[in-house]
């Protein structure tokens, strides 16, 4: 195996933790002897893991230390010493292996907790957005209700006269309802049943006063109710089709509806 393969496969970590077979361990040892750069890399890795183990080590209970010291003191000096031969390479201790395993477990757990935190944060952001959207919809509903209530109160006064402007042969499917309050001098129009026009055309309302057509305003069919101009002494209400933006005088041949007051 070349140097990069050895680094990438994690076999050095396995060697350091004593997880390789004897044959594999000898092969790694021979490679380390011949490759100074790899040997330096391994030494650095060994120091790092040792430092990690020390940082995560757990001190043994004090009675363990006392027990060991007492046993040493009670040992006879003539007792034949048992010598345990060291292996050729540096073996990691049992406690070190446990500490390293715990450190690895800690890192994995930290990664899992971080992912959980990110998922939770994304969920909270989504919930906050949905809450804001719901609040906006509730505000719109409340505003629509207030708007509807305002129009309802305006057109249901006893003094209000309701007039239906039906379409003629130029626009037979059109219809609009005008609510005229002579006492408050108000005219409210419901234009929703007027036939849709091309964008370059619009509806316009006129009041006939002694044969003169006076502008009451352009009609937008996108609204439920529109406040039009109140014209004193009007004899009839009239609707014509005009160029977009309205006209300063009515196009009589484009009259589509009228009603007498």
Image (cartoon, rainbow, N blue to C red):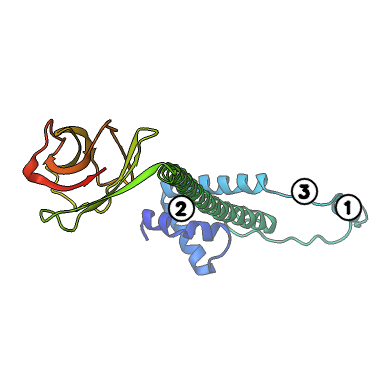
Residue 84 image point, x, y percent = 71, 61
Read off the residue under disc 2.
33
Residue at position x 83%, y 62% in the image: 80
Q: Secondary structure at mark 3?
A: loop
Between label 1 and label 2, give the one nearer the viewer. Answer: 1
Residue 110 image point, x, y percent = 58, 51
- Mark 1 and mark 2 residues within 8 Å of each other at the beta carbon: no
Residue at position x 48%, y 45% in the image: 142
Of the 4 image quadrants, the one containing the N terminus is: bottom left
Q: Quadrant of residue 231?
A: top left
Between label 3 and label 2, give the one nearer the viewer. Answer: 3
- Mark 3 and mark 1 residues within 8 Å of each other at the beta carbon: no
Residue at position x 70%, y 49% in the image: 57
Read off the residue under disc 1.
63
In this orientation, which residue lies closer to the viewer: 225 or 32? Answer: 225
Residue 20 image point, x, y percent = 53, 66
Residue at position x 22%, y 38% in the image: 235
Q: Report how far apart the C-alphas of labels 3 and 1 lie in the structure.
A: 11 Å
Q: Secondary structure at mark 1?
A: helix
Residue 75 image point, x, y percent = 90, 57
Read off the residue under disc 3.
59
In this orientation, which residue lies closer to the viewer: 114 or 205? Answer: 205
Q: Is residue 231 above or below residue 39?
A: above
Name which of mark 1 and mark 2 comes first in the sequence: 2
């Amino acid at each position: 195996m070349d140097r990069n393969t050895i680094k990438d496969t994690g076999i050095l970590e396995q060697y350091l933790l004593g997880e390789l077979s004897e044959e594999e361990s000898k092969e790694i040892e021979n490679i380390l002897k011949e490759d100074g750069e790899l040997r330096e890399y391994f030494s650095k890795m060994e120091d790092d893991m040792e430092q990690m183990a020390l940082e995560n080590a757990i001190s043994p209970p004090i009675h363990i230390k006392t027990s060991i010291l007492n046993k040493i003191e009670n040992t006879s000096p003539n007792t034949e010493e048992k010598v345990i031969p060291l292996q050729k390479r540096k073996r990691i201790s049992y406690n070190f292996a446990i500490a390293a395993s715990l450190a690895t477990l800690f890192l994995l757990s930290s990664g899992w907790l971080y992912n959980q935190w990110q998922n939770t944060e994304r969920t909270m952001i989504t919930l906050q957005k949905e809450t804001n959207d719901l609040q906006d919809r509730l505000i719109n509903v409340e505003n629509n209700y207030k708007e509807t209530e305002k129009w309802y109160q305006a057109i249901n006064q006893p003094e209000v006269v309701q007039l239906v402007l039906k379409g003629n042969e130029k626009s037979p499917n059109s219809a609009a309802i005008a609510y005229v309050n002579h006492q408050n001098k108000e005219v409210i129009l419901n234009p929703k049943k007027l036939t849709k026009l091309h964008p370059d055309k619009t509806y316009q309302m006129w009041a006939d006063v002694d044969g003169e057509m006076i502008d009451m305003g352009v009609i937008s069919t996108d609204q439920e109710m529109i406040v039009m101009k109140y014209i004193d002494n009007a004899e009839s209400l009239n609707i014509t089709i005009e160029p977009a933006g309205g006209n300063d005088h009515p196009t009589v041949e484009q009259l589509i509806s009228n009603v007498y007051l």
